[in-house]
Image (spheres, rainbow, N blue to C red):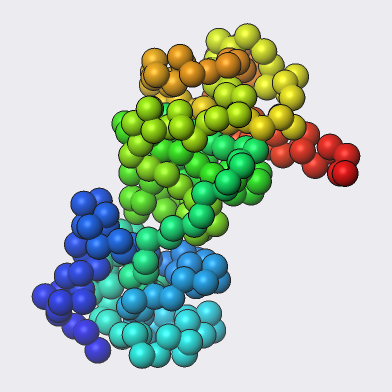
């Protein structure tokens, strides 16, 4: 059992909670039964797996430890608490390779989160994107780190199912948008989100909570869309608005005749 927070494996796990270390090492620290299980389910093999004795009493954690015995290490409750980013950790965590899913050669639906700074909002956008059939997510500079702990938890496994480009300049973003109709979600849009054709190859820009999308994003936008609302509500937060729009795209695409 690892009982000291000075253990080199524990230090490595803690270091990976910093963005610079994640990028340098190409590794990610994930905590919780759901996230570790999702990573493994998508074919990722942990470099290290940490568990507590109490967590080992659950069948799912037992299965994870049995499947990855050579890299599985029991840790004390105090060490797990020190490593985890949650107040009440679930007793299982892992160090895994940063996912590097292939970018689609000819994407038909992309999400761009421009200036979204709330971790919960970005994580929810990623979760909705995965569920709505989005094929890739672009996270330009000025947006919260998509691999930060709070974003990972809110994403509920979406990070392991979606290719994500992060930290791009807008010049680099533009190179990924060739052939796509680019729509910006905004409270002051010119067209309703459910009155545009999402069966066309499209990219959706969702801007930050406070000031919306940046000027570079607006300059590349082909169409500004909005959501009609009742009761004089002025706007929705980024995660809700983006999710509504992405699922409208999903609805239209499901209805499109095949062949």
Residue at 31% of width from left, 64% of height from top? 27
Count of marks placed on residues? 0
Horizontally, residue 83 falls left or right of residue 49, namely left
Instruction: Residue 233: name its quadrant.
Output: top right
Residue at 36% of width from left, 90% of height from top? 70
Residue at 55% of width from left, 30% of height from top? 178
Quadrant showing the N terminus: bottom left
Residue at 37% of width from left, 61% of height from top? 98
Q: Which of 1 and 175 is in front in this view?
A: 175
Give the answer, above or below, for where 146 lies relative to 248. Answer: below
Horizontally, residue 9 falls left or right of residue 59, namely left
Q: Which of 246 and 58 is in front in this view?
A: 246
Give the answer, above or below, for where 30 lies relative to 230. Answer: below
Horizontally, residue 148 falls left or right of residue 219, namely left
Instruction: Residue 82: name its quadrant.
Output: bottom left
Q: x, y percentage for residue 191?
A: 67, 13
Q: Is residue 238 visible?
A: no
Horizontally, residue 41 falls left or right of residue 19, namely right
Quadrant showing the C terminus: top right
Q: Can residue 129 be seen in this view?
A: yes
Q: x, y percentage for residue 254?
A: 80, 42
Q: x, y percentage for residue 224?
A: 58, 15
Give the answer, above or below, for where 169 lies relative to 61. Answer: above
């Amino acid at each position: 059992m690892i009982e000291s927070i000075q253990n080199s494996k524990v230090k490595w796990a803690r270091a990976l909670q910093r963005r610079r270390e994640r990028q340098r090492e190409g590794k990610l620290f994930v905590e919780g039964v759901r996230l570790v299980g999702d990573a493994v389910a998508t074919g990722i093999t942990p470099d290290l797996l940490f568990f507590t004795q109490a967590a080992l009493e659950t069948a799912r954690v037992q299965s994870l430890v049995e499947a990855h015995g050579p890299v599985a290490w029991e840790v004390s409750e105090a060490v797990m608490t020190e490593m985890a980013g949650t107040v009440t950790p679930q007793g299982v965590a892992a160090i895994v390779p940063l996912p590097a899913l292939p970018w689609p050669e000819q994407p038909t639906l992309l999400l761009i989160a421009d200036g979204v700074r709330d971790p919960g909002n970005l994580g929810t956008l990623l979760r909705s994107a995965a569920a709505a059939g989005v094929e890739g997510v672009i996270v330009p500079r000025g947006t919260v780190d998509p691999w930060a702990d709070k974003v990972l938890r809110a994403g509920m496994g979406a990070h392991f199912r979606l290719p994500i480009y992060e930290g791009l300049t807008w010049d680099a973003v533009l190179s990924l948008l060739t052939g796509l109709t680019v729509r910006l979600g905004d409270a002051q849009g010119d067209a309703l989100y459910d009155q545009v054709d999402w069966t066309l190859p499209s990219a959706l820009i969702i801007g930050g909570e406070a000031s919306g999308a940046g000027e570079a994003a607006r300059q590349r936008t082909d169409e500004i869309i909005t959501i009609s609302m009742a009761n004089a509500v002025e706007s929705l937060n980024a995660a809700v608005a983006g999710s509504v729009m992405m699922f409208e795209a999903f609805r239209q695409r499901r209805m499109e005749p095949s062949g």
